[in-house]
Image: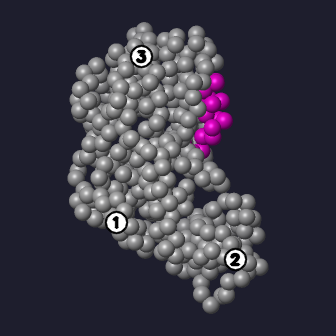
Amino acid sequence: MTTRNSPVAVVSSRGAQRLREGKVWVYRSDTVELPERPGLYPVLDVRERTLGWALVNAASEISVRLLTRGEESADEQLITARLDAALAYRSSLKLSADAHRLVHAEADGLPGLVVDRYGDVLVVQNGTAALEPYLGVIVDALVRRLQPRGVLARHEGRVRTLEGLESGTYTLYGEVPDKLTVHEPSARGEVKYLVDPYRGQKTGAFLDQRENRLLLGQYAWGQALDVFSYHGSFGLHLAGQAEHVELIDASAPALARARENMELNGFGNVTYSEANAFDRLRELKREGGVYGAISLDPPALAKLKKDLPNAYRAYKELNLRALRLLDVGGVLGTTSCSFHVSESEFYGMLQDAAADAGVRVRVLARRGQAMDHPELLGVAETRYLKFALVQRLG
């Protein structure tokens, strides 16, 4: 039993049941009493029994993010111990890429905290107000253990607003250049690409698709397409194996960076199409295009649950058009990063698209995010990426 001479969080019976079932989040609607200030606090049920310690923020819709269970307390030492465990796990993966995730929020027991490595630079994002006072401790620990050239804060996005936190991008330690060159394994050895840690998507690049890019590249042949190419991350792996690859994106600046990345690797077998992906796929079909490999990596089309019907139609349309362009024996690497699109819905959509396209398709691989972005059981949001590698049979 925890004494009440200090602030605590008290959750309702339903909130307590969620925690006992292995969940780690309690929403504000399932709380009874919350401290005024964000921070680390004991969590009690309505009968005053201690359920654990949590990061608590009364201003957030997710008011309680559990760190420990039972009587184990949470403090600065626990946070640094969780950080050490996260770094040890990444070390155990023996990654050959020098750009990867070091801390993956709830899945590493540090809710809301993301730390990504780009060579000798680290980028930190925090989306939890209760963890904000400990960022100095976290950065000091990262510097001592990894000796980076610099550490950058990318504190931005809707999550920080919801937590009542200010946004901003600024250096936390050392120096961080505007442009970095990093490497990842490919079917031909490795590819290099440029990262803008200040302005690039997420913390600078899409690291969660690294293993899927490698897989698709291993199957690529003939003519290839990288649809929603952004900076050409999938296209780099296609260009190394295919005769020719076309990158399609609606953003001219994104294609300009993709061109830089292709030139950095010496790939001249690439063309760039600034276009709406739906329209361009339609054009390519009219032109009689036939492809041995296609990457389809759209942005999140269902950011909210209410977006699902429209998102389903858009995903189906994209995949239907891609499947119609595939040669027999050709492969499609197709993705959804929308958490609200479940895995069963994603594969149901693929089945419907194949049926409407009039093609037979087999699944070569069902994947999610890379291993340095682990999933935590009980927190479905940590399993957000769906990637299928499929092959047209006829």
Residue occupying the point 47% across, 56% down: 88
Residue occupying the point 24% across, 63% down: 174
Categorize mark 3 by other alpha carbons within 10 Å: few (<14), some (14-19), many (20+).
Answer: many
Camera sees residue 329: yes
* Whether residue 376 is situated above or below residue 274 in the rendered picture: below
Q: Distance between the residues labelled 1 and 2?
A: 35 Å
The tag on residue 371 is: none
For this rendering, which residue is in front, 366 or 56?
Answer: 366
Majority secondary structure of the magenta segment? helix
Q: Which colour scheme is used?
A: one colour
Type of amino acid under label 1: Arg
Q: Is residue 155 left or right of residue 33?
A: left
Secondary-structure class at tag 2 = strand
Quadrant the C terminus occupies: top right
Type of amino acid under label 2: Thr
Q: What stretch is highlighted in magenta?
A: 338-352
Task: Name the N-terminal-most of marks 1 and 2.
Answer: 2
Q: How far apart are marks 1 and 3 (CA)?
A: 45 Å
The tag on residue 50 is: 2
Type of amino acid under label 3: Trp
Categorize mark 2 by other alpha carbons within 10 Å: few (<14), some (14-19), many (20+).
Answer: many
Secondary-structure class at tag 3 = loop
Q: Where is residue 371 in the image (x, y as percent from the top left)?
A: 51, 44
Task: Name the N-terminal-most of marks 3 and 2.
Answer: 2
Camera sees residue 162: no
Residue at which label 3 appears: 221
Q: How far apart are marks 3 and 2 (CA)?
A: 59 Å
Categorize mark 1 by other alpha carbons within 10 Å: few (<14), some (14-19), many (20+).
Answer: few
* Whether residue 139 is situated above or below residue 194 in the rendered picture: below
The tag on residue 144 is: 1
Residue occupying the point 60% across, 53% down: 376
